[in-house]
Structures are given as structure tokens and as C-alpha cells.
Image (spheres, rainbow, N blue to C red):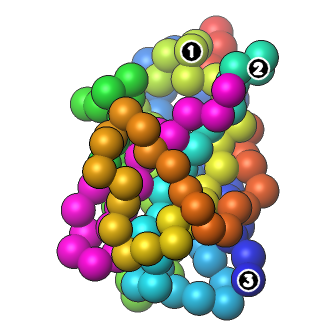
Amino acid sequence: VQLQASGGGLVQPGGSLRLSCAPSGFTVDDYAIGWYRQAPGKEYEGVSCISSSDGSTSIADSVKGRFTISSDNAKNTVYLQLNSLKPEDTAVYYCATHDSPHCPPDNNNIYFHGYWGQGTQVTVSS
């Protein structure tokens, strides 16, 4: 079982990136999947989650209106679209699964009790 995250990079403030998370050993239909991030010197922050049960999504207030999570079942991939990036979005972004088809109910307390993937670095700097 693996989660492969990709798509990070260096981008200027105001720019965009799309992160991808491709599980192997299971499908995106099996669990809620989403993203954590960890900025330098800070704790992990749950950013977003998509439920496998009904496709509903959770987005943390800190990124609402700028980040969008989606799932492509045919490609067995979950995406996180990052728009209007700010320097404070600089972090390592990890994809992870919950141990349920449903995302945690509080969008400002997103957590994952399942599998974690390796992170992908996002750096926002001019």
C-alpha cells in the first residue's frame, strides 16, 4: 500500500500548482483521502479532504477559496489545486487516507487515521 504525492515546486506569489495523489494497493473509492501540510517550524495542518462515500469535500478556512480538492476515479487519483498562492503556503504537502469513507466533520480539524504518503515540497517565493 502506497500513496504517491507529486506536483510540488517553486512558484511566485499569486501563482498556481496542482498536486496529485495516486494510491496503489487500494482505490480512491475505499477511503476518504486528503492533504496535510507542514511548514518549517510548525505543526501539521489538515488542509483538505474528499469523502469516498459521496464526494463531499472539506477545506480548511486558511485556504478556502484558493484550494480545491477533487477526485478522478478513472485515474485513481486525488488532486489538490492550489491557486493564489502565498508565501505562508510554503510547506511539505502530504496526502493521506482516513480510516473511513467519510471525512472528519470539522473542516478546521482535518485529520487522517490511515495511510500517509511521502510529501511534496511547495515553495512560494519571489
Above or below: residue 1 compared with residue 117: below
The N terminus sits in image quarter: bottom right
Crowdedness near tag 3: few (<14), some (14–19) or many (≥20) residues, C-alpha within 10 Å: few
Q: Earlier in the sequence, mark 3 or mark 2?
A: 3
Give the amino acid type for the residue marked by disc 3 in the picture: Val
Residue 51 is inside the magenta segment? yes
Q: Earlier in the sequence, mark 1 or mark 2?
A: 2
Mark 1 element type: helix
| Residue under pointer 1 | 88
Picture disc at residue 40? 2
| Residue under pointer 3 | 1
Q: Earlier in the sequence, mark 3 or mark 1?
A: 3
Give the amino acid type for the residue marked by disc 1 in the picture: Glu
Indicate left or right for 79 with 116 as reference: left
User: Where are the magenta residues, as a range?
Assistant: 43-57
The Cα atoms of the two marked residues, 3 and 2, are separated by: 28 Å
